[in-house]
Amino acid sequence: MRESWIDRLLELALPEAPVIVDGGANKGNVVARLLEALPRARVLAVEPQPRLARKLAKRFAGDARVTVRAVALGEATDTRTLSVMNRPTLSSLLPPTGIRDKYADETLTVTETVDVPVARLDAVAAAADVIKLDLQGYELPALRGASGLLPGVSVVVAETALVPLYDGQALLPELEAFLAEYGFACDGLYDFARGPEGRIVSGDAFFVKRRASSARRPCPAHRPD
């Protein structure tokens, strides 16, 4: 599967060698797809789960374009507890209280907890053109921790929810409001998932730096491929 927002990213006027942050890089599949689409890109891959971070570093050990950091992204330097799910991509710094609304056909359990370091993105990276965040409900604290970078960022892609999947999760309207302060507007909601009742519960929100005259509007949905 290729994230459909990558096609939208390629339509934009990015630098020839863009700097991309992949927050919540997991096994590195999105990193690989980004490098396939943008061969001259430089990617900072951030993954808090220790086992996955080691696999990520091993996978890209020979690729000078990729830097791996084994930390969680947040609003302040800290240590927090990561709940690791039996489906590792759902591991989160927040309790997964509502995640079954999205994955109604799966048995989801927390298999272990592990303390992980937390860092601000603007303390980890000097600059970025694109920030992608897939942090299972922790996207808003990570964006607050990226505030020093956001004036120079062109695109933010953040997995988000329209109903709470994790305890304390900021929903899409809160992400829109925060990013609007830095000049971003929602361009679309990609690769979205529906709950058992058919309503959209989550998706990848694609934000672009808007022109001063651009009006704010609700985030439109784009059907998954």
Image: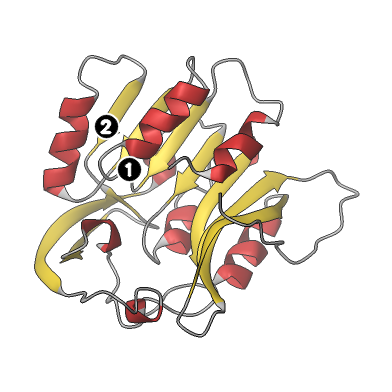
The amino acid type found where label 2 is placed reads: Val
Vertical comparison of 149 with 197: above or below: above
The amino acid type found where label 1 is placed reads: Ala
Vertical comparison of 46 with 194: above or below: above
Q: Earlier in the sequence, mark 1 or mark 2?
A: 1
**Disc 1 to disc 2: CB gap under 8 Å:** yes
Residue toward you, 148 or 43:
43
The residue mark sitting in front, 1 or 2, is 1
Task: Tell me where residue 220 appears, x and y as whole percent.
Answer: 72, 61
Quadrant housing residue 110:
bottom left
Task: Tell me where residue 213 appears, x and y as whole percent.
Answer: 91, 49
At horizontal 35% and vertical 56% (from top left) the residue drawn is 76
Residue toward you, 187 or 118:
187
Residue that numbered label 2 is attached to: 68
**Can residue 126 be seen in this snapshot?**
no
Which numbered tag is attached to residue 25? 1
Task: Tell me where residue 13 appears, x and y as whole percent.
Answer: 71, 26
**Can residue 6 be seen in this snapshot?**
yes
In the rendered view, does 208 fall on the left or right side of 102? right
Residue toward you, 154 or 86:
86
